Image (spheres, coloured by chain):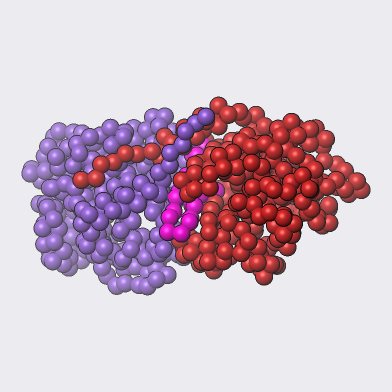
Chain colours: A red, B purple
Amino acid sequence: MSLITVGTMAFDAIETPFGKTDRIVGGSATYVAYSASNFIKPVQQISIIGNDFPSEELFELRARGVQLDGVEVVPDKPSFFWKGRYHEDMNSRDTLVTDLNVLADFDPKVPESYQGAEFLMLGNLLPKLQLNVIQELRTRPRFIAMDTMNFWMETAMPDLKIVLRYVDMLMVNDSEARQLSGQFSLVKAAKSIMEMGPKYLIIKKGEHGALFFHEDQVFFAPALPLEDVFDPTGAGDTFAGGFMGFLAKTGDISFANMKRGIIVGSALASFCVEKFGPTRLKEVNQDDINGRVRLFQDLVNFDIELS
Amino acid sequence: MSLITVGTMAFDAIETPFGKTDRIVGGSATYVAYSASNFIKPVQQISIIGNDFPSEELFELRARGVQLDGVEVVPDKPSFFWKGRYHEDMNSRDTLVTDLNVLADFDPKVPESYQGAEFLMLGNLLPKLQLNVIQELRTRPRFIAMDTMNFWMETAMPDLKIVLRYVDMLMVNDSEARQLSGQFSLVKAAKSIMEMGPKYLIIKKGEHGALFFHEDQVFFAPALPLEDVFDPTGAGDTFAGGFMGFLAKTGDISFANMKRGIIVGSALASFCVEKFGPTRLKEVNQDDINGRVRLFQDLVNFDIELS
């Protein structure tokens, strides 16, 4: 099985209550790749970078089984850059700088070697570009998941609604789910969004965990209670990468297996937030991941006999 | 086994985005009693009411096995009255009116017939009064839980710190846990609070569920995702009543059984919010409760084999 992932590879500068960092490597596809490569090879990356993206990072991704044929390198422009500052609750942030740079020219192409992939993760991008990728694939993947954001709901809602009809799963956060559906109740929002196309929906609530909806079923995965959330940047993409990597590894897209994938994704995300950028993700191995999954089992496991 | 519950029996007037209600019956001890009486008889109530508290309500409580020997009736004053308005997220509210009335004179006494109770639930009250109840009991209950609020942290912190040394469990919401400990991280807040006395701590997060801490163990119970939270008034007390009622019924104060109690309490709370006041609580039976517990099992249950 293989997994195509489409998104940004970029630089971030981050301020949190715990510290700040200058330009470090980030981007949705970077986090997805680091996370998914724990489970599946190859991860087939589609992105765009400038002349400033560190070659050591590309080397490390390749060493983890990430194919970079679909990563366009623009020789005369810098990579996408984002600077932001998190508030104390770490669930909200202010964007200080957005330099699109190479991202302004992004026109994702699917390399011939990626054709036939069974899983597709569409990172948060202009909906038109997400649709282009789907349409470039000669065989529809077994399972397509996508992310999006409020900005596209405000500027490209018609296109977004078209893409939604082509995907199996939408992953958004709670405020995005509310904006997309016009419903405050997340249960009502979920029903409304599933009528727009996706049969599966994950609503991410940051430190409050994630809700997973499919037809009349609902599953809840908590976030691991951590002493400190050091830097939440990339946690959502890391979650998506772990989830999709796990599905691709097991080849099982039943509801029960997706629940497992959500726990695995949550475990990866719980590592991600422990250090700035993808630093911590590069350190963890399968034993670490298994240990974290066991913590999730302990966290929610209960047995009760009904009288 | 018996359970003593101490707290208010009162009138509330409530505004939510879904509607408003004039003076209806409320009060922490009222909710605890309706909830706990699903599991244990007698529930031994200690409270104070005025000449206006409806006798049908007292009759209904008695019919459910709630003893009222400890409920003082003041003939020439009205009952405690609270009026509040909830914001759209239902996790925050403004207090519009607080008329203490009889509550200003509350000096809870433990009736002789309550001596020897094995479980004690101290509702949110002036800490000095909570301490008085503990000291009036000739035999220390096996398990004492208490609630409190920000107001007492601001006006009676020294007394509050004394009571904390006498109880087994504290139940507070997330903002109260942060204020009491001075820690933003709930994990750090929990460690700090457990050093103040309680060996067990429940942090309630409203629609985001509840965290349960004991030594190095942590358990998380989600709130049931509901289409509408109609009125959250009393949900925390209903949770406490379900939890303590279940512990008293089973007589088992192991960590594993407390986890069950938290699920049972969450199930009861999920009914409470469906209608104004304790209305919905009066309607549910054991089958309804079991059905709700099953929903919680489905909500968080997953199986995963680690490779």
**Residue A264 lies in what quarter of the image?**
top right
Direction from residue A125 to residue B47 in the image, left or right: left
Residue at 78% from the left image edge and 41% from the top image edge: A68
Q: Quadrant of the N terminus of chain B?
A: top left
Name the spot of residue B186 as percent of width and height, x first. Answer: 47, 41
> Relative to B125, does residue B96 appear above or below in the rendering?
below
Q: Is residue A208 magenta?
A: yes
Q: Nearer the viewer, residue A225 or B135?
A: A225
| Residue at point 18%, 42% (across, down) | B249
Residue A65 point in image, percent of width and height: 71, 34
Query: Can the viewer see residue A89?
Result: yes
> Residue A99: image x %, image y %?
80, 53
Foreground pick, B93 / A123: A123
- Position of B81 compared to A176: left or right? left
Q: Please state the extent of the stretch shown in magenta in the rendering.
A: A206-226
**Can residue A261 be found in the magenta stretch?**
no
Q: Residue at x 13, y 53 (%)?
A: B66
**A155 w.r.t. B199: above or below:** below
Residue furthest to the right in view is A76
Q: Quadrant of residue B58?
A: bottom left
